[in-house]
Amino acid sequence: MSSIFDEKTMIQYLEQRIPKGETLIAGIHGIGIASEIKQVFVNCILIGEQLIPEKNGATLEISKCKYSKSDVYIGITQHYLILSECESYMHLYEFNDHPDLNGTVAEELHTTIAVQDVGSCFPLDEIRKCVVKKGWMGSFNCSITMKNGNFLKLMLPKFGGMGGGMPHHAQYREAILARLSACALKGLDHS
């Protein structure tokens, strides 16, 4: 059994990205198919691969994209969709220290974060559009567009791997699908 198909490991990875005051409701192993993420931070500096708070620091836009399949843990809390890569994968990063802030909400940085952790936590109420479709062999494909234009395409497999390391996969997958389907049914397309 691959170590990524272990519920305790999955919970540890997801809990590192959960905002304070939130609790993990459900989490599964899934496949990240594509992601296009932009996030703007104010009062920060970039040193190596770390964003560090700085009172008189710059405004920095980070773009993070990936267009190939990778293993991810997918979780939900009361108010957030959480993603965590199972292993370290390469992404395309672009940094802009003069972003166009027209209509963009910039986040003030209060703690140091790794650049790789950008785009791992998404407010459920910021989902503008969510399309859930049946996929191959009982899987579901979810295309999620956030109000700020961020985009995720995820595959939620029917099974949680061989060996029984993910005993709650079916239950948790249904909880995640129910939450994402509710977003799709609410017609949250505010474009």
Image (cartoon, rainbow, N blue to C red):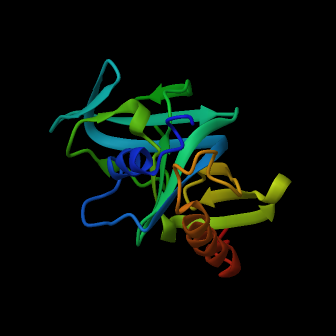
Residue at x-position 49% and y-position 35%: 3
Determine the image quadrant of residue 66: top right
Query: In this orientation, which residue lies closer to the viewer: 112 or 177?
Result: 177
Residue at x-position 31% and y-position 58%: 19
80 w.r.t. 137: above or below: below
Asked if residue 127 lies left or right of residue 95, the reply is right
Query: In this orientation, which residue lies closer to the viewer: 61 or 126?
Result: 126
Residue 154 position, x and y percent, is: 66, 50
175 w.r.t. 63: above or below: below
Query: In this orientation, which residue lies closer to the viewer: 44 or 152?
Result: 152
32 w.r.t. 95: above or below: below
Residue at x-position 65% and y-position 81%: 186
Asked if residue 181 lies left or right of residue 20, the reply is right
> What number of labels is visible?
0
Residue 45 position, x and y percent, is: 26, 28
Residue 135: tell me if it is visible: no
Determine the image quadrant of residue 112: top left
